[in-house]
Amino acid sequence: MKEFLERERYSETYNWLYHEKSPYLQQHVKNPVNWFPWSAEAFTKAKREGKPLMVSVGYSS
């Protein structure tokens, strides 16, 4: 089961923002972008795939 959950977490369809508490991040759950919250995993994945990071500091009123 743990292996399945790890594979699912790194699949193309996993939504990294789904469990976030921030209202700003929750606004972007259904975006067609696979956003990551600020985390070591985001940096590790970008480095492993040779991709740059796009950082959104966000504002919501």
Image (cartoon, rainbow, N blue to C red):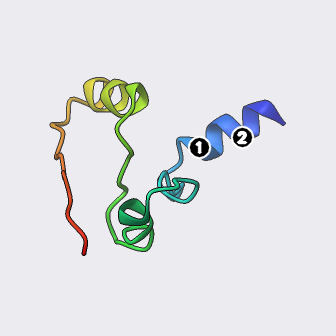
Residue 12 is left or right of residue 34, and the answer is: right
Contact check, label 1 and label 2, Cβ < 8 Å:
yes
Identified at 26% across, 24% down, the residue is 47
In the image, residue 37 above or below residue 49: below
**Where residue 6 sits: x, y (%)?**
65, 35
**Where residue 36 sits: x, y (%)?**
38, 47
Q: Secondary structure at mark 1?
A: helix
Foreground residue, 43 or 6? 43
In the image, residue 5 above or below residue 48: below
Q: What's the residue type where badge 1 is placed?
A: Arg
Q: Residues within 10 Å of mark 2 (few under 14, many from 20)?
A: few
The quarter holding residue 59 reads bottom left
**Where residue 11 sits: x, y (%)?**
53, 48
Identified at 15% across, 37% down, the residue is 52
**Where residue 28 sits: x, y (%)?**
37, 68
The quarter holding residue 43 reads top left
Badge number at residue 9: 1
Residue 7 is left or right of residue 36, and the answer is: right
Q: Quadrant of the C terminus?
A: bottom left
Badge number at residue 5: 2
Foreground residue, 3 or 37? 37
Q: Secondary structure at mark 2?
A: helix
Q: What's the residue type where badge 2 is placed?
A: Leu
The quarter holding residue 14 reads bottom right
Q: Residues within 10 Å of mark 1 (few under 14, many from 20)?
A: few
Report how far apart the C-alphas of labels 1 and 2 lie in the structure.
Answer: 6 Å
